Image (cartoon, helix red, strand yellow):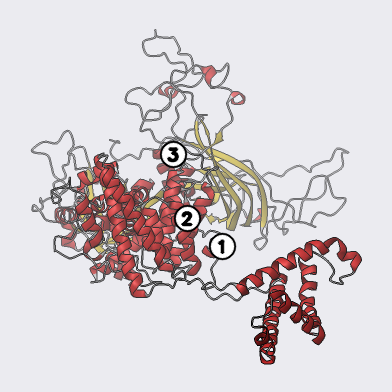
Amino acid sequence: MPPKGKDVAPPPPKEDNNPWGVFVNVAVEHASIFLDVPPPSALPHGTSQKGNKSPPKTPPPAKNPSGKSAAPPPDPAAPPPAPTTHLSINYSSEYAVVSGQATSAAVPDGQQAPGADDKPPAVPALPDVALTYKYAFTQRFRQNEGREALNTLINSKVMLQLHDSQSGAVLGKAAIDMLPFGMGQREFEIKEIKLEGVSDSGAGGVKLLSGTLHNIRLFLTCRKQPPEGASAASAVPGVIPPAAAPPAGSRPGTSSLGPAAAAGSKPGTPAAAASKPGTPAAGAKPGTAAPPAAMPPADDLPEPEPYRYITEEEAQQGSNVAELELGELAGLPPELQPAVDVVGGKDGLQGKITLVAGLQLPGGGPLLSVSCPQAAGQLGLRGRMRCVVSAEQVDSLKAHLDNGLPLYIELARYVQHDALVDNAWDAYHAGAWLAGAPLLMKEGTLEAPAAAAAAADSGSDAADGVALLPWAALAEEAAAAAAAAEEAPAPGLGASSLPSYTPPASAGPKSKTVDAETPAAGSCIWQKAGTRLVNARLKFAKPILETWVPPEPPSKKVPDLVPTRDLNPPPPPPTADDDVRTCVQDIVRKLAAAYAVKKQQQGEQGLEDVAGTDLPPAQRHRQLIFELNRSGAYMELRDSLKPAVIRLARDKFGKSGAMHPVEMTPAFSAMYTHVMSLACEQLNKACNTWPKPVTPQAPSLDELAQLGVLARQYTDEATCAVQVLQATGNPDLQASQRAAMLLERAEALHQRRLLDRDNPQVWYEHAVMCARTQQYSRALASLRQSLAIAPAFIDSLIALGGITLTLLLSQAPGQGSAPEEAGFADLHEGALVAGHALVAAMPATSGLPWALLSLVYAAGPGGASRQNKGWASCQEKLSKLEREALSAQDAGGDAASANGPYLLCRKLLDLGLKQAALKAEAAVLLLRRSSRTLRYDIHLAAAETRLLPPYTTPGGASPPSSSPAKPGTADANTAGSSGGTVNVSGAAAGAAAGAAGACRSQEGLGAPAGRALAAGA
């Protein structure tokens, strides 16, 4: 304790010469300064510009080297020259400031006339003219490594000071915020900082009117100390290294040049300072001086390397900086000031009272505590505390707030006195709810005021603040909220985070107390006085829930991968061959008509009756040819074929079409053969009297539905039988043959349905059958047909994404195949295209497409990590949709789509894509609030094995209808989700029950058994 009635002067600051540790480097380029410099005549008589009094002297006339008198002194009315200035860094009350070199003001352009003396004239200091000082200022100060040192740095008050170099007085100062280092930056720049003038600078009348420092750059470097016990050569060859690092818990900036400090010395005190140089060491003979510790020469030290307190990976994962800011206490209790006077004593130095406020972040987060000791006999509560928060701790805070759990500020009074006992500590132990904490779960929000959200919006927080409550009542309410939370009770919620009061060691039963009367048990002095905490808030350097940015869409769309098919395409343009065929058909019709007319004429003339029989075919042919030549019809038919033959020569044989003999002679043979083949083709068609083939007709809608039910029944029976055979290991040949027969029947039924080739639903259902039987290539082909008809068909997009994801997972690195050779990039791009198309096609409130996209991004480069921006964006969107859905549920809305991965998992199981479904099942847990209400474990086991009947909720809700959807429609949100059930169709359930003869007791088969069967399958 200091002597009574005496002020103890603080120890002079010492130099920090430790070459090891982290260095904060500060570089300043230049400054623009307005100074008020009084002329020498304005100074008091006998006072120099330094402010020191000296007897007036008459200086002798100056002479130049030639012996002549110098020029007369300058005009007293002329403006005084600008003083030289320098900068310094004030970063600690324990260590001396780090100063730069003195610099003169720069000469403005055009003021120095040509032919002037070698020495440039001094720049005049005018109050309305900005002086430019070009600094070569690059100085640094030392810190320790580690998270504790970083927290100290971002809470430090680092000042850049402007000095008058002649007097050394501080003219102005500017504070630098070290927060960017806490956000993971290695360096940052500040374009300009305004200087704040010092009212009483003591610089001989020089005052700073205003000023700005320009282009300030700060960066971190580190020179790591050799490990303890290592030789000097390990760090600096030939140099004895300094001793070990400072002990754990020493404050950053403390020196560690010598051996460990002796017991009882202050932390960070160098061993060399424990005793004066030359004093004997412990145990040495009197008069023997201890050799001083060797310092490595500066030239032999290794160069500091670039350094970050927070790695880039930690910053990308979501590391943040939390800050507790306290304004003031409004309405202090009247009992508090008498207690301050009693503890301080007559001289105010006997002891002190400190108010400490703390906010404990959940999930193992740091304690943000602000300590405010009494100053000038007065108590208040104003200040801030920053602390780095890891990404895991930020996630814990978000989960805490998502569960509706509270945050609160704890307040306590601490008495430091060697004799007095605080008998009112419990009565001054209080807390206040941070009612604005839910605001942090709004996108882009940086701070949460202690007042309620409504009060914060109306601005009443600054005036009213938040009331202080007894700690016991607040802790009990917080513990009850933790016990009633949907999640497991939050550990530590309701427990005090501030240390309990400890009486002094000399205290006894008869020790005097601080307060005259001991408050009643359970009472709260703050509450009795109506004290309120004003302008208290929890802030973050960046939002814990950043504004959502959608993932970058792929460059391709679904039509780029699957060209859209025109359901009513125009006929193709006729080719040259088609023209020849058309002409031949026309000639055949005309010849047939002419032959019929000739035959009729012969009959009328009685030629056939005279002979008694018809004329021979050869004679009839000669008569027809004669008649065609005689009438000119043959030439007409030949000329009608000429345009088609000319086009054929031009298009088919690459000729000019002039039909010149020289040009056409080489091609006559081939062209004649081709024309005759076309003519014979048409003549054969004309002579063919067989019935025309019947074109199959597409089934009607009712027939499509019936065929679909049968096909699904056959497929379900076959797949269930196969799964039972695989799970039980029963080599039943008859069952295998029956399963193959059922699949053949299902395929035949689907082929019948595919006659309706313009219906996307039938192609999708055929793809489902192929996917469930692991015919992925055929499934993708059918899905392409479906998407070629309807590019936004939801079911087909889900199936395309799920099958492609399954192929991605089977070809992922470490699965025994090379992704590059197997087209891994193409598969990933196709899955992304399907996922983004699904986002555009489905309702904005559905989480299923984002669940699919998150799995696709996780299967690609980057994996499921925050560095993968696509995956992180999808997870943020899923969390946002979950919050919105659960809020709608609280308001009476439907929250069936709250958990997108859950809905996706069930769709993938319906498709038989178990590998992708297991990934979706794992993603269900990432949405903790909704996953607890879905009871998904039993659901997935039942759907995976296909051996259990549809699971219903304890309320007895029946499963949804499994009627086929109409063509072109789909609802992925509600398919099989009503009543919290897994959508196993009635036909599939019956087939599964019939095929699972070995599983007699279906009610007793729980999730573990179901998973075992699924693993075997």
Question: Dot 3: few (<14), some (14–19), or many (≥20) neighbours within 10 Å?
Answer: few
Query: For this view, does 238 lie left or right of residue 73?
Result: left
* In the depicted structure, whether residue 695 falls above or below residue 829: below
- Residue 101: horizontal and vertical position, in percent? 63, 41
Disc number placed over residue 815 in the picture, else none: 3
| Mark nearer the N terminus (3 vs 1) | 1
Q: Amino acid at mark 1?
A: Asp
Q: CA distance from mark 2 to mark 3?
A: 19 Å
Q: CA distance from mark 3 to mark 1?
A: 30 Å
Residue plotted at (38% across, 71% down): 969
Q: Secondary structure at mark 2?
A: helix
| Mark nearer the N terminus (2 vs 3) | 3
Instruction: Name the residue tied to disc 2.
Output: 831
Q: Secondary structure at mark 1?
A: helix
Q: Nearer the viewer, residue 698 or 190?
A: 698
Residue plotted at (36% across, 65% down): 846
Instruction: Name the residue tied to disc 1.
Output: 560
Q: Give the image quarter of residue 894.
A: bottom left
Marks 2 and 3 in Cβ contact (< 8 Å)? no
